[in-house]
C-alpha cells in the first residue's frame, strides 16, 4: 500500500506512518520544509517527503499508484486568533491537494475531522472548529460530486504518547509524572470517548482496507472512538492512580468553557461491521502510555 500523508510529523500522522512502515507499506509525507530534518528524525528512514509548496498536479502524475491520501495536518490556532492563517492551513492547503488529485487520478481522500463540531458556539478553539466545518462542507458538497471518494473521519478524544504538551492528556500525565504538587481542573463531569492512539491507527487501517467504503465515489462519514464515554474526572483519577502520583486534584478550580460539550461518544457500527473493535481499555491505554513515557525519558 502506498499513501500520501499530510501532517506526517504530527501526533497521529507519525504513529500512522510508523505502523504502515512496519506492515511493509510506503508513505510519502508532506512537510513544510524539506531542508529541515528536525521534525522527521523520529520517523522511519525509508519515508520520502514532498514539500507543501510543491506542484501537486505534477506529483500525482508521477505517482499514479497511490492508494489513498490521508490528511492529518491541522492548525489549532492555539497561539493566536489569526483566522486567515487558519484558513490557509486548514482549508486552502487541502483544497490544493484535492484540486490536483481531481485533475489526475481521483485517489480516495481521508480527512481527519473533530468531535468539536457536534455543538455550535463551543467556547474552545472556535476558529479551528469553524475552519474544519468549512472544509467538511466543501468536501461534502463539491468534491464528492466529482467522483472522488471522500471519507470524513470524526476523531473522538485521541490520547497516547508523544502528543503535544499543550494537549490535555499529555499535559496531565506530564504533571502527574513530574511530581507536580497540585493540578487545577474543571469539575470533570464532561464525558469523552477516550480512544488510544494504537486503536485509532488500526481503525484507519481497517477503513483503508474496506472495499465497501472505498469503492463508493461519494462523501462518507466514519467516527473513530471506543463507543463508550467516560467522565474526565474518572479519567484523571485513574491516571493519577496508575502513575502513583501524590498530586492534589483541584476539581472545580477551573470553570467550564462556554457551551461546554458535556458528552461525546463515537458511533462505531461501521467499523464493527468491518471486524474492528478497540483493543485498549482506559487502564491498558494509560499503562502503555506511561510505560512509553518512561522509555522515552530514559533515552
Image: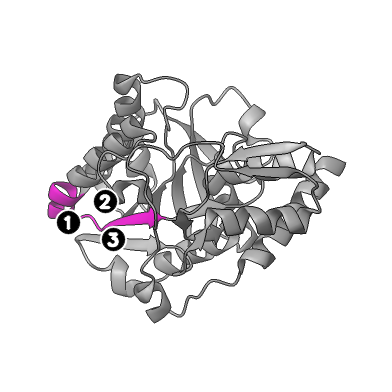
> What span is colored magenta in the figure?
140-155
Residue 150 position, x and y percent, is 26, 55
User: Which residue is label 2 attached to?
Assistant: 105
Dot 3 or dot 2: first in sequence order is: 2
What residue is rendered at 62% in x and 35% in y? 165
In the picture as drawn, the residue positioned furthest to the right comes out as 298
Inter-mark Cα distance, 3 to 1: 16 Å
Residue 119 position, x and y percent, is 28, 48
52, above or below 80, in the image: below
Q: Quadrant of the C terminus?
A: top right
**Residue 137 sits inside the magenta stretch:** no
| Residue 297 placement, left or right of 193 | right
Q: Which type of secondary structure does the marked residue at label 1 adopt? A: loop
For disc 2, the neighbor class at 10 Å (few under 14, some 14 to 19, many from 20) is: some
Residue 85 position, x and y percent, is 34, 21
What residue is rendered at 12% in x and 53% in y? 145
User: Which residue is label 1 attached to?
Assistant: 147
21, above or below 125, in the image: below
Residue 82 position, x and y percent, is 35, 19
User: Are the two marked residues, 3 and 2, in contact with CB atoms closer than 8 angstroms?
Assistant: no
User: Which residue is label 3 attached to?
Assistant: 221
Inter-mark Cα distance, 3 to 2: 22 Å
| Residue 137 placement, left or right of 208 | left
| Residue 250 placement, left or right of 153 | right
Dot 3 or dot 1: first in sequence order is: 1
Q: Which type of secondary structure does the marked residue at label 2 adopt? A: loop
Q: Which mark is residue 265?
A: none
Amino acid at each position: 500500500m502506498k499513501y500520501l500523508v499530510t501532517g506526517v510529523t504530527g501526533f497521529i500522522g507519525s504513529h500512522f506512518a510508523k505502523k504502515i512502515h512496519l506492515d511493509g507499506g510506503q508513505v510519502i509525507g508532506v512537510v513544510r520544509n524539506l531542508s529541515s530534518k528536525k521534525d522527521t528524525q523520529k520517523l522511519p528512514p525509508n519515508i520520502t517527503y514532498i514539500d507543501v509548496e510543491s506542484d501537486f498536479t505534477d506529483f500525482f502524475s508521477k505517482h499514479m499508484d497511490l492508494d489513498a491520501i490521508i490528511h492529518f495536518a491541522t492548525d489549532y490556532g492555539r497561539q493566536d486568533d489569526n483566522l486567515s492563517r487558519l484558513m490557509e492551513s486548514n482549508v486552502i492547503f487541502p483544497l490544493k491537494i484535492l484540486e490536483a488529485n481531481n485533475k489526475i487520478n481521483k485517489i480516495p481522500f481521508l480527512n481527519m475531522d473533530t468531535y468539536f463540531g457536534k455543538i455550535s458556539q463551543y467556547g474552545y478553539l472556535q476558529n479551528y472548529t469553524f475552519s474544519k466545518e468549512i472544509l467538511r462542507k466543501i468536501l461534502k458538497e463539491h468534491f464528492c460530486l466529482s467522483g472522488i471518494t471522500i471519507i470524513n473521519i470524526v476523531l473522538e478524544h485521541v490520547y497516547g504518547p508523544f502528543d503535544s504538551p499543550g494537549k490535555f492528556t499529555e499535559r496531565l500525565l506530564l504533571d502527574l509524572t513530574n511530581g507536580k504538587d497540585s493540578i487545577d481542573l474543571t469539575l470533570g463531569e464532561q464525558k469523552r470517548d477516550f480512544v488510544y492512539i494504537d486503536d485509532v491507527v488500526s481503525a484507519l487501517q481497517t477503513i483503508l482496507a474496506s472495499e465497501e467504503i472505498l469503492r463508493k465515489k461519494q462523501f462518507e462519514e466514519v467516527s473513530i472512538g471506543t463507543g463508550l464515554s467516560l467522565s474526565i474526572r474518572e479519567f484523571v483519577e485513574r491516571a493519577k492512580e496508575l502513575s502513583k502520583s501524590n498530586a492534589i486534584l483541584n476539581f472545580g478550580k477551573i470553570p467550564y468553557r462556554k457551551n461546554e460539550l458535556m458528552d461525546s461518544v463515537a458511533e462505531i457500527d461501521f467499523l464493527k461491521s468491518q471486524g474492528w473493535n478497540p483493543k485498549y481499555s482506559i487502564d491498558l491505554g494509560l499503562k502503555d502510555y506511561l510505560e512509553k513515557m518512561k522509555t522515552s525519558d530514559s533515552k
